[in-house]
Image: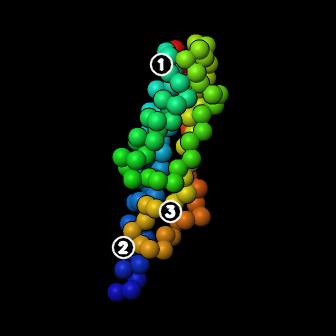
Amino acid sequence: MPVLVLITFGALELSNMIFLKQSLSIASYEGAKRGTSPGASDLQIRTRVQEILTSRGIKNATIAVTPTITPATARGTMVVVAVSSNGSGVGVLSVNLFTPTILRNQTAMVRQ
């Protein structure tokens, strides 16, 4: 019985880590997509990424936008949005098995 419980909670923890990785991927994509539209700014990118993360219950993420985007940023500029988070805050157990793991996703798009 203890082994079965351990396997069950391990599977739940792994599922939550996959959810976190997918959430970071979606957030970085949406941020980069927002950053490539004409007139977009760094603040709009960060706001969009934070909206996605908040809707998915992720509170401890770091957002990096390279380069800093302003409405005057030239067309053809590569916009890179990177979102990272550690595994804490998404686990079922009070002791998260994947806390030391840092998950990161980045998306690069060319500004239109």
Q: Earlier in the sequence, mark 2 or mark 1?
A: 2
The span from disc 3 to disc 1 (Cα, nearest Å) is 33 Å
Q: Which mark is residue 2?
A: none
Q: Is residue 109 visible?
A: no
Q: How many marks?
A: 3
The span from disc 2 to disc 3 (Cα, nearest Å) is 19 Å
Amino acid found under the numbered disc labelled 3: Ser
Quadrant in which the N terminus is drawn: bottom left
Amino acid found under the numbered disc labelled 2: Thr
Dot 1 surroundings within 10 Å: few (below 14), some, or many (20 or more)? some
Is 13 above or below relative to 28? Answer: below
Is 2 above or below relative to 100? Answer: below
Secondary structure beneath label 3? loop
Most foreground residue, 109 or 72: 72
Residue 89, position as x, y percentages in the image = 46, 62
Labels 2 & 3 near each other (Cβ < 8 A)? no
Secondary structure beneath label 1? loop
Most foreground residue, 61 or 47: 47
The span from disc 2 to disc 1 (Cα, nearest Å) is 44 Å
The residue under label 3 is 88
The residue under label 1 is 37
Residue 98, position as x, y percentages in the image = 53, 65
Q: Is residue 28 visible?
A: yes
The structure residue drawn at horizontal position 60% and vertical position 34%, both measured from the top left corner, is 65
Q: How is the image coloured?
A: rainbow
Q: Which mark is residue 8?
A: 2
Q: Which residue is at the far right? A: 67
